[in-house]
Amino acid sequence: AQSVTQPDIHITVSEGASLELRCNYSYGATPYLFWYVQSPGQGLQLLLKYFSGDTLVQGIKGFEAEFKRSQSSFNLRKPSVHWSDAAEYFCAVGAKEYGNKLVFGAGTILRVKS
Amino acid sequence: IAGITQAPTSQILAAGRRMTLRCTQDMRHNAMYWYRQDLGLGLRLIHYSNTAGTTGKGEVPDGYSVSRANTDDFPLTLASAVPSQTSVYFCASSKERGNEQFFGPGTRLTVL
């Protein structure tokens, strides 16, 4: 069955430090992938997406992610974290071969310390 | 209206009562979705609709029903609420199935 794993439930980084949030998937097909961010009490906002082409994708708010097929990963990165980045981050994966149903990871809560 | 709206924002409901969560989008998206979000489980798909007039079951459909009479509206009904349906419910839409999804602000439902 398709699955998405975000190994880190919580991550704390200092403001100005770099960030990497991990996402691994298990799919028997070529996936497309998303990263969403959720601030407390809010809905999910799309940060970036990968369907095909260049495996390094740029998103909003200075985020980027790299699709690595050999590692079944789609890790989210940001070179310098701002206090406003504190939120919960979700990786999501879908595939045409599985009816385009989007499967979400359990989320990673990011805390930023000043 | 801009994007997706959901109503109510929150609701406390007695077990056994019927409840309809409303979702409206103004983006003329064909596909719409209902998810529930529970701590540690991420988002799980309840039902979806690829286009007006069609619906399908997601990962956790039991106890829920949906209808899609037109493009804009996609209500979710709990026929007889149970405490395990306490959750935050998100409606989403996408231009077509497989495109990026846009989410509403959510409805926090508590069933006592």
Image: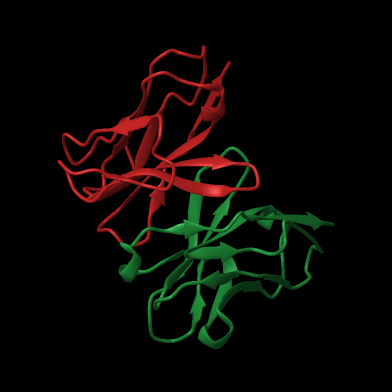
Chain colours: A green, B red
- Residue drawn at x 39%, y 76% as measured from the top left: A29
Q: Is residue A22 left or right of residue A47?
A: right
Image-based side of A46 in relation to A23, left or right: left
Along the line of sight, the residue nearer the viewer: B37 or A60:
B37
Quarter of the rendering occupied by the C terminus of chain B: top right
Determine the residue positioned at 18% across, 44% down: B54
What is the x, y in percent for residue B61?
39, 39
- Given residues B18 and B62, the one toward you in this image is B62
Image quadrant assignment for residue B46: top left
Q: Pick the quarter of the image with the N terminus of chain B.
A: top left
Count of all numbered marks drawn on residues in the image? 0
Q: Residue at x 57, y 58 (%)?
A: A105
Residue A20 location in percent, x, y?
A: 69, 72
* Residue closest to the eye, A97 or B76: A97
A87 left or right of B47?
A: right
Q: Which percent across, then down, holds residue B30?
A: 21, 51
x and y, in percent, of residue B32 in the image: 30, 46
Height in image: A80 above or below B40? below
Q: Quadrant of residue A95?
A: bottom left
